[in-house]
């Protein structure tokens, strides 16, 4: 294979050298012919003879100059500004060398006319340019012809450097079946102008009109510097066009020179969330974590793994990942070892339900900060196996918290959920008991115990968005449990930022709550995702309503009525006031609950209702 490539390269260079030799000869004689208006007989011999005698030397020197300026090693199929500059400079240098040679070869004191040198350089540039850039032109024409009937017609929103780079790649690629038909940009100074032959039609108000006019199939949003608010506004316009939408991730792609079609990603539903990401005081977090031994339970899960990523970036003394599932633990281990090779990282396979195992881990490694993310979180599955939810969530939290208190952990942060508020399912009720445990522990130990409560996390294991994507990829239908069901949503990095900042604000006993803006209707999420994927709702992809699942309610709450609300330094993070509980009664109930769950009690829900009176099940 290598020999074939080398042979092709040799043939290509040989062809170019032969062509350039002919070009040098032609430029030498055409320059003097143009000077004398193409009348050969009018050219004095004392001008023609030096040109002829010097020509062999000129050929050798010019070919050498072309090698020096890499005119035989550039990939002319992708030639751009740099290659054009090299070509022009090479020809100018050749003209200068030619002038010196002809001056030495002159037969009279007069020498070759000065206009000859300018004409020589101009002619040589034109001939060499034709050989290099004609290939690219013909290739582009071939690409257009081959795809004229089946090309994907593309609109690019953003007539800047990123848009220009994407157009260039599409035009020069042998494999692209795309055809850029128009550009959109809110900068009025660009309206009516052209980028690589593509017209800037106008601002965002022109998007829908141009989609119809140019029969656009896909829309690329190529504005790396745009805020989430701007992207969301553009998507709101574009999603009604029934075009498939793709977006360039961020400005760092442009800075790193990574702008290309391959960097465009499909638009995600989180791009349409009605708020900006939660702002986090990174300096405070870095001071809080730097130099500390940090332990994360459930470190291989969606939230746990993101916790590990962000903690690893803040220079902990040691990061300990605890998870029962070895595959996910291995994946985050390998990722962190690659990104942070010098970090002291320890990955342990362990169950939070194993008292001796948790005690031995805390005794040996003495973590200072613990993030407890290990839990069973899937609502319908926990409804079928309620005793497992209690064993893992409630008593896994108890045992981990007890080990933390016993072995001097400074801060213990429980990952909770909005489903713990007035719960209608086992998962939510179990998490409410976990909150009660850590609030109770905080009163009796030096460890600062807190909980962080947030809504549904986009992209997490079990999230509705990956399910919708799979259903759309399979041709539908997309299943929604109820047309009126609503949920609060946040991204995984946002959730983790809240958890980390809660550790900074924690004094013990708090339940931290994120103000996540307005809740989102799941039906609207499904419709938007279908549209963003380039399909029509009800025609290409159907939506089916399957009914509420066991333990599921139409809406979630973030605070119970009696908890109240207290602000923090971050206006999007609030604190729920601790609720007073009868601890003696609570501990007695937990002891009984533990025994019943061990014995696989068939009516564990009644006991849970006694502990969490706000828990509603089967209409009770």
Image: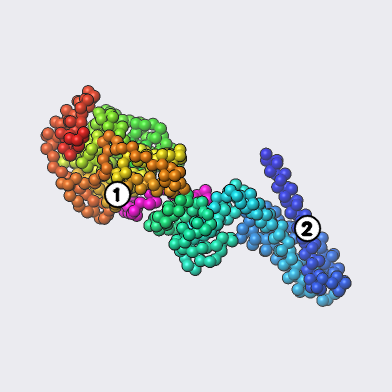
Q: Quadrant of the C terminus?
A: top left
How far is mark 1 from mark 2, CA to CA? Answer: 72 Å
* Whole-percent x, y for residue 486 in the image: 30, 46
The residue to which callout 2 is attached is 21
Q: Residue furthest front?
A: 539
Q: Residue furthest bottom?
A: 110
Name the secondary structure under disc 2: helix
Q: Is residue 90 above or below residue 169?
A: below
Seen at 50% across and 49% down, the residue is 263
Seen at 46% across and 58% down, the residue is 208
519 or 304: which is nearer to us?
519
Left or right placement of residue 243 versus residue 446 in this view: right
114 or 420: which is nearer to us?
420
- Other-residue count near label 1 (Cα within 10 Å), few / some / many at <14 / 14–19 / ≥20: some
The residue to which callout 1 is attached is 519
Q: Are marks 1 and 2 in contact (CB under 8 Å)?
A: no
Q: Is residue 539 magenta?
A: no
What span is colored magenta in the figure?
258-286
Seen at 75% across and 52% down, the residue is 15
Q: Quadrant of the N terminus?
A: top right
600 or 88: which is nearer to us?
600
Query: Quadrant of the rendered structure where residue 550 is?
Result: top left
405 or 538: which is nearer to us?
538
Q: Is residue 415 above or below residue 283?
A: above
Q: Is residue 497 above or below residue 114?
A: above
Seen at 82% across and 64% down, the residue is 54
């Amino acid at each position: 294979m290598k020999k074939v490539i080398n042979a092709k390269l040799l043939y290509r260079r040989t062809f170019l050298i032969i062509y350039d030799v002919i070009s040098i000869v032609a430029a030498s004689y055409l320059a003097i012919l143009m000077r004398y208006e193409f009348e050969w007989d009018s050219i004095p011999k004392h001008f023609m003879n030096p040109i002829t005698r010097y020509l062999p030397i000129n050929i050798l020197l010019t070919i050498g100059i072309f090698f020096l300026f890499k005119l035989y090693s550039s990939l002319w199929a992708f030639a751009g500004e740099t290659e054009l500059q090299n070509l022009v400079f090479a020809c100018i240098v050749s003209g200068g060398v030619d002038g010196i040679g002809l001056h030495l070869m002159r037969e009279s004191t007069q020498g070759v006319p000065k206009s000859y040198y300018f004409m020589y350089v101009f002619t040589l540039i034109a001939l060499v340019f034709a050989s290099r850039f004609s290939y690219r032109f013909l290739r582009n024409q071939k690409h257009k012809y081959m795809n004229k009937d089946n090309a994907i017609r593309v609109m690019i929103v953003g007539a800047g450097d990123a848009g220009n780079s994407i157009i260039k790649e599409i035009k020069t690629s042998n494999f692209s079946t795309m055809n850029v038909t128009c550009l959109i940009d809110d900068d009025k100074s660009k309206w009516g102008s052209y980028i690589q032959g593509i017209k800037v039609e106008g601002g965002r108000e022109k998007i829908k009109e141009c989609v119809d006019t140019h029969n656009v199939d896909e829309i690329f949003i190529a504005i790396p510097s745009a805020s989430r608010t701007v992207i969301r506004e553009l998507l709101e316009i574009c999603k009604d066009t029934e075009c498939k939408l793709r977006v360039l991730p961020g400005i760092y792609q442009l800075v790193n020179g990574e702008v290309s079609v391959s960097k465009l990603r499909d638009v995600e539903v989180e791009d349409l969330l009605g708020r900006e990401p939660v702002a986090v005081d990174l300096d405070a977090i870095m001071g809080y974590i730097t130099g500390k031994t940090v332990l994360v339970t459930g470190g291989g899960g969606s939230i746990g793994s993101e916790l590990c990523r962000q903690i690893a970036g803040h220079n902990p003394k040691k990061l300990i990942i605890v998870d029962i599932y070895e595959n996910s633990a291995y994946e985050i281990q390998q990722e962190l070892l690659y990104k942070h090779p010098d970090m002291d990282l320890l990955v342990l396979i362990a169950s939070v339900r194993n008292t001796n195992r948790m005690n031995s881990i805390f005794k040996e490694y003495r973590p200072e900060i613990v993030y407890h993310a290990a839990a069973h979180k899937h609502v319908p599955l926990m409804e079928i196996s309620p005793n497992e939810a209690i064993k893992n969530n409630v008593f896994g939290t108890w045992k981990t918290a007890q080990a933390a208190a016993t072995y001097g952990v400074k801060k213990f942060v429980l990952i909770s959920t909005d489903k713990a508020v007035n719960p209608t399912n086992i998962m939510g009720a179990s998490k409410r008991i976990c909150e009660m445990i850590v609030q109770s522990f905080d009163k009796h130990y030096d460890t600062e115990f807190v909980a962080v409560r947030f809504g549904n996390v986009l992209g997490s294991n079990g999230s509705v968005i990956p399910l919708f994507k799979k259903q759309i990829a399979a041709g539908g239908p997309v299943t929604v449990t109820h047309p009126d069901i609503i949920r609060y949503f946040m991204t995984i990095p946002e959730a983790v930022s809240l958890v980390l900042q809660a550790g900074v604000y924690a004094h013990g006993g708090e339940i931290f709550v994120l103000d996540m803006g307005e809740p989102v209707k799941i039906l609207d999420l499904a419709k938007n995702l279908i549209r963003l994927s380039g399909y029509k709702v009800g025609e290409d992809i159907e939506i089916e309503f399957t009914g509420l699942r066991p333990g599921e309610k139409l809406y979630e709450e973030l605070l119970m009525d009696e908890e109240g609300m207290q602000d923090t330094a971050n206006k999007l993070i609030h604190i729920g006031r601790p609720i007073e509980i009868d601890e003696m009664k609570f501990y007695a109930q937990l002891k009984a609950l533990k025994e019943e769950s061990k014995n696989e009690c068939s009516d564990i829900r009644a006991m849970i209702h006694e502990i969490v009176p706000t828990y509603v099940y089967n209409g009770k």
